[in-house]
Image (tube, grey):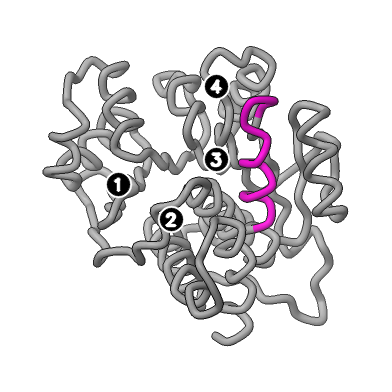
Amino acid sequence: MTSFIRKPNASDDKYSRGVLGFITSSEAFPGAALLGITAAMRTGVGLVRYLGPAQVSDLVLQVRPEIVLQDGRAQAWVVGSGVPVDDQEQAARINRVVAEKNLVVVDAGALQIVDFENCRATCVLTPHAGEAAALLDSLGKKISRSEIEADPIAAAVLISKLTGQLTALKGNRTVVAQGERSYQFDPAPAVLATAGSGDVLAGIIGAMLAGNAQDIASGESDLFDVVKAAITLQAKAAELATRDSTVVALDIAEAVGRVIANS
């Protein structure tokens, strides 16, 4: 895990540490952006851009004044968390990003927005079982949520093959799949069964993609292993957060920094 955490050195600036863009949230689901951005910043990304509704921008800026509310270059993007499928404005932004050769975490609503046949980006898909069933249905495969939960490895592998993208199928035992290659985690901390934990994971993965973008592009770092490291980091943050109190998603996001500091 620690080999993919981009800790700053004396020669770094905010850009070399990684720039991560977010196209997340909507007026109905404003918190997703704050959760993902907080998790990403605690993971150690150098700069965060946010593109979304003014109401959400104002909310995030109040808590995270470090963010930039302006489009621009980024080493990676997180898209879809808290975005309804029918949000045309956010969908247009998402489609622009995946039409280019970017590293992109595709979460929640974006799983239905992105046309994977015409996607030029290298993506990490992060569905839970229900979203996986909907995605498979859109790809011509009728597999129920209960069937996916019964055999998550097969489902994750199938999604990866059909989309051509790495898939992290979230659940009690999250599965990462890339083509025929797959890995199933041990049971996750139960506190991850809370609203917003998926938004936190998307932010952590995005930060690790941004921080390792150059090495991923060159082949020095394996995308599969980077995603596994991000999932491990979230689990460790959840475990640490439980030592203090009952846990909500923002606690997990904030605990990420403490895990890294102690690693």
Image quadrant containing the C terminus: bottom right
State the separation of the CA atoms marked 1 and 4. Answer: 27 Å
Residue 229 drawn in magenta: no
Is residue 232 found left or right of 261 in the rendered image? left
Please name which of the two marks, 3 or 2, marks the residue nearer to the observer. 3
Q: Residues within 10 Å of mark 2 (few under 14, many from 20)?
A: many
Q: If you read the primary sequence from the N terminus, does the residue marked by circle 1 or circle 3 appear first?
A: 3
Is residue 113 found left or right of 36 in the rendered image? left
Looking at the rendered structure, the kind of residue marked 1 is: Gln
Q: If you read the primary sequence from the N terminus, does the residue marked by circle 2 or circle 1 appear first?
A: 1
Q: Position of residue 167 (x, y in %)?
A: 35, 43
State the separation of the CA atoms marked 4 and 3. Answer: 18 Å
The residue labelled by disc 1 is 178
The residue labelled by disc 4 is 84
Looking at the rendered structure, the kind of residue marked 4 is: Pro
Q: If you read the primary sequence from the N terminus, does the residue marked by circle 1 or circle 4 appear first?
A: 4
Badges 2 and 1: C-beta atoms under 8 Å apart? Answer: yes
Considering the numbered disc 4 on the image, is that residue within a helix, a strand or a loop? loop
The region drawn magenta spans 26-38
Looking at the rendered structure, the kind of residue marked 2 is: Leu
The residue labelled by disc 2 is 223
Q: Is residue 64 above or below residue 81?
A: below
Question: Which circle marks residue 88 in the picture?
Answer: none
Considering the numbered disc 2 on the image, is that residue within a helix, a strand or a loop? helix
Q: Position of residue 136 (x, y in %)?
A: 27, 24
At horizontal 50% and vertical 20% (from top left) the residue drawn is: 113
Is residue 247 found left or right of 191 in the rendered image? right
State the separation of the CA atoms marked 2 and 4. Answer: 28 Å
